[in-house]
Image (cartoon, rainbow, N blue to C red):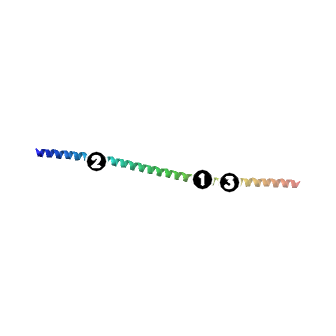
Amino acid sequence: MSMSLDVLKEIRTAEKQAKEMIEKAEADAKRILDEAKVEAEQIINAARERAKNEGENLKKQIEQEAEQEIQKIKEEFGKKIRAIENIDQSKLQKAIDFLVESLLAQ
């Protein structure tokens, strides 16, 4: 009978150890999942921050390029306006010369 009790005692000890191992495995699995979740959130946040920074840098670059184009257009129009003003002034000068010559011819 003693042997039967020893066997039952060993079975209960083995069951207790198995239960403890299962509980530890479940706790480890939960801890691993929690750590993975935190790590995933950190990766996502870092990716968002990189995307935000890249977006801001791209926006600045586009704004700078647009400003450069605006300056080029302003310079071109400035040259054209000055050319038009010069043409008008030369025509005005020709008109004045014509009038002066007409008056002097009389």
Closer to the camera, 73 or 20? Answer: 20
Measured along the vertical axis of the image, is residue 13 above or below residue 105? above
Q: Residue at x 71, y 54 (%)?
A: 82
Asked if marks 3 and 1 touch (Cβ < 8 Å), the reply is: no
Look at discs 3 and 2 and give the one toward the viewer: 2
Name the amino acid type tagged 2.
Lys
Q: Which residue is mark 1?
A: 67
Image coords of residue 31 (percent x, y): 33, 48
Image coords of residue 18 (percent x, y): 23, 46
Relative to 68, 39 lies left or right:
left
Image coords of residue 77 (percent x, y): 66, 53
Name the amino acid type tagged 3.
Gly
Asked if marks 3 and 2 touch (Cβ < 8 Å), the reply is: no
**What is the crowding at mark 2: few (fewer than 14 residues within 10 Å), some, or many (at least 20)?**
few
Relative to 90, 55 lies left or right:
left
Reading the chain from its start, which is encountered first: label 3 or label 2?
Answer: 2
C-alpha distance separating marks 3 and 1: 16 Å
Look at the numbered disc 2 and give the secondary structure of its residue.
helix
Q: Residue at x 20, y 46 (%)?
A: 13
Q: Residue at x 76, y 54 (%)?
A: 89
User: Residue at the right extreme?
Assistant: 106
Relative to 8, 96 lies left or right:
right
Q: Which residue is mark 3?
A: 78
Q: Which residue is mark 2?
A: 24
User: Residue at the left extreme?
Assistant: 1
Q: What label sits on residue 79 in the rendered view? A: none
Q: Residue at x 82, y 54 (%)?
A: 98
